[in-house]
Image: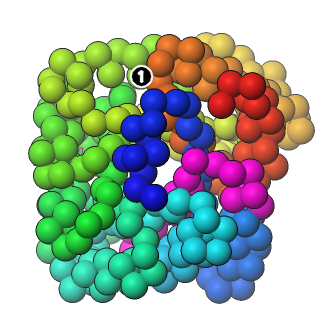
Amino acid sequence: MKIKDILGQGKPTLSFEVFPPKTEDKYESVEKAAVESAGLSPAFMSVTYGAGGGTSRYTVDIASMLSNTYQVPALAHLTCVSSTKSQVHQVLEELKERNLENVLALRGDIPKDGVVETDYRYASQLIYEIKQTGDFCVGAACYPEGHVESVNKTADIGYLKEKVEAGCDFVTTQMFFDNNILYNYLYRIRERGITVPVVAGIMPVTNVAQIKRICQMSGTYLPARFKAILDRFGDNPAAMKQAGIAYATEQIIDLIANGVNGIHVYSMNKPDVAKRIMDSLSEIL
Ligand code: FAD
């Protein structure tokens, strides 16, 4: 099923994320986590893609397993920062062969050494090309706090509009920890005529090192309320996990109460975390 149709049903949806292993020896454990998460019957599951292309085979394999064996609609991520057109088309052919119809089209992060051998500069070019290649439902990334490389938020929203004009059917946000940031962003993008569904990306933070790394990379704002949780429980993994899940769940409830129906949980191969969130929302979803 196409994700735009799932999102178009006008009711709350919860989706989860899997990231494929970098090496084959970890494949089985990731597969197990993906299957367990699929057992919770999320609206769909997304499978990330290594920007270097190293995990591309696993992305397609896991997405295919979720969709074809477990009947959970899969969203295969695809990056273009280090790819040639022929590499992109090879992945698209594989997706078609396995009846996978949903792609999250991304540029990917520029490698640390800055070396890029690519036929693409921005995700909008990839989106356009995917749309020309087949009947895919295409999603894209968006950044309520602005993308780290962008000059300012207004410019960033202008580039988001280019992605929508290139054919993207929905967008998923970067994680955020203050819902007011999303509400403000929604207002601004709707004002600019961007009307595609927006899926809110929520990260249940279960350890402090992880969130510090992410914030360094993306400049994500941490509200005082959230910082207090990190300060108080950061040294106690079990307490941090419980508090992180509770914070994410509260964010989700507030989003749904305010009419944001599409919620994507960055569950990071942790089916137990996904389950605890799903269980807490049983009467809401
Ligand atoms: P783009 O939309 O191309 O934007 C990149 C930068 O260029 C932005 O600063 C933008 O403002 C600017 N820009 C865009 N168009 C123009 C233009 N015409 N002229 C000038 N500037 C322009 N990474 C992975 O490697 N694998 C994944 O699976 C993955 N999944 C993700 C899922 C989500 C929901 C999100 C939010 C991010 C994900 N990422 C993933 C990270 C993503 O690849 C990075 O954030 C990357 O740096 C930007 O990708 P993009 O598709 O948003 O790029």
Most foreground residue, 192 or 268:
192
Judged from this view, the residue extending furthest toward the front is 9
Give the structural element (helix, strand or loop) at label 1: helix
Question: Disc 1 marks which residue?
Answer: 182
Q: Is residue 32 visible?
A: yes
Instruction: Tell me the kind of residue under disc 1.
Output: Leu
Image vertical order of residue 44 relative to residue 51, above or below: above
Q: Is residue 95 left or right of residue 136?
A: right
Q: Is residue 230 visible?
A: no
Per the rendered image, the range of residues in magenta is 36-55
Tell me the residue at 83%/32% (across/down).
242
Residue 63 placement (x, y as % from top left): 53, 70
Q: Is residue 124 left or right of residue 12?
A: left
Image vertical order of residue 253 relative to residue 216, above or below: above
Image vertical order of residue 8 relative to residue 191, above or below: below
Secondary structure mostly seen in magenta is loop
Most foreground residue, 138 or 210:
138
Tell me the residue at 37%/47% (across/down).
4
Tell me the residue at 73%/66% (across/down).
35
Residue 270 placement (x, y as % from top left): 74, 54
